[in-house]
């Protein structure tokens, strides 16, 4: 009869044999995982910058939303917020808006005068629609989106309620990585 000590050695020997038998398969599995991980990393656009994408397909209708936070918070009257730049497309229609996170200067109904700057170009005034008290939308979204695709930096200047003008700077570099999706969903090309 075997002693308890002999059973333990027998079990260890069986376990060792099983591990030895599995080792080539484990190595192959780990190598395969490493290859898949590197391929998956290549499939993600490397130059998409800080943009967040939300593609949606519902009831046969495709839409696309890209959003980007400003590089830093802006200050208004009794409030600080990091503005968000959003591009939204559905059925060939495009929209571009900025959520400022704070009440805007009281102006004419449905009109906010903002200043826009692409890269190091000269800033220029532009009239945007007021969507909510803290969100404005470009009237000519398609033209501006196409300019954003070519830019690295976008500065959006607005006037918060009861405060000095504030500038939100967006690092828009990488938007060009989404050009095929923008062309398809925003402009139907």
Image (cartoon, helix red, strand yellow):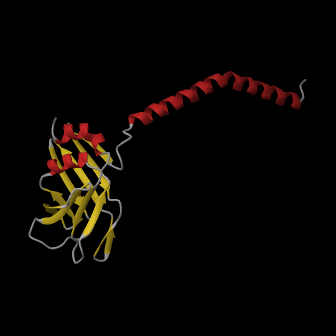
Task: Pick the residue in front: 58 or 146.
Answer: 146
Q: Position of residue 174 (x, y in %)?
A: 32, 45
Residue 59 seen by the camera: no
Q: How many badges with numbers are in the image?
A: 0
Vertical position of residue 136 compared to residue 159: above or below? above
Residue 42 seen by the camera: yes
Task: Pick the residue in front: 41 or 46.
Answer: 46
Vertical position of residue 87 compared to residue 189: above or below? below
164 relative position to 14: left or right: left
27 relative position to 69: left or right: right
Q: Position of residue 155 (x, y in %)?
A: 26, 59
Quarter containing the N terminus: top right
Quarter where residue 91 is shown? top left
Quarter containing the C terminus: top left
Quarter where residue 79 is shown? bottom left
Q: Position of residue 18 (x, y in %)?
A: 71, 24
The residue under the point 74% across, 23% down is: 17
Task: Pick the residue in front: 35 or 90.
Answer: 35
Q: Position of residue 38 (x, y in %)?
A: 48, 33
The residue under the point 25% across, 40% down is: 179
The residue under the point 68% across, 21% down is: 21
The residue under the point 22% across, 41% down is: 182
Vertical position of residue 161 compared to residue 188: above or below? below
């Amino acid at each position: 009869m075997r002693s308890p000590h002999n059973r333990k050695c027998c079990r260890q020997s069986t376990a060792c044999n099983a591990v030895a038998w599995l080792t080539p398969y484990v190595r192959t599995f780990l190598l395969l995982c490493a290859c898949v991980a590197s391929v998956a990393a290549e499939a993600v656009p490397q130059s998409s910058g800080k943009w967040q994408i939300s593609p949606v397909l519902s009831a046969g209708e495709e839409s696309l939303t890209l959003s980007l936070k400003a590089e830093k918070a802006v200050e208004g009257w009794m409030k600080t917020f990091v503005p968000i730049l959003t591009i939204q497309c559905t059925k060939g229609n495009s929209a571009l808006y900025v959520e400022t996170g704070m009440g805007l200067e009281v102006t004419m109904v449905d009109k906010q005068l903002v200043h826009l700057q692409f890269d190091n170009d000269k800033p220029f005034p532009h009239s945007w629609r007021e969507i909510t008290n803290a969100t404005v939308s470009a009237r000519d979204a398609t033209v501006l989106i196409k300019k954003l695709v070519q830019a690295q930096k976008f500065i959006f200047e607005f006037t918060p309620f009861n405060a000095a003008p504030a500038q939100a700077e967006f690092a828009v570099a990488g938007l060009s990585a989404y050009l095929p999706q923008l062309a398809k969903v925003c402009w139907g090309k």
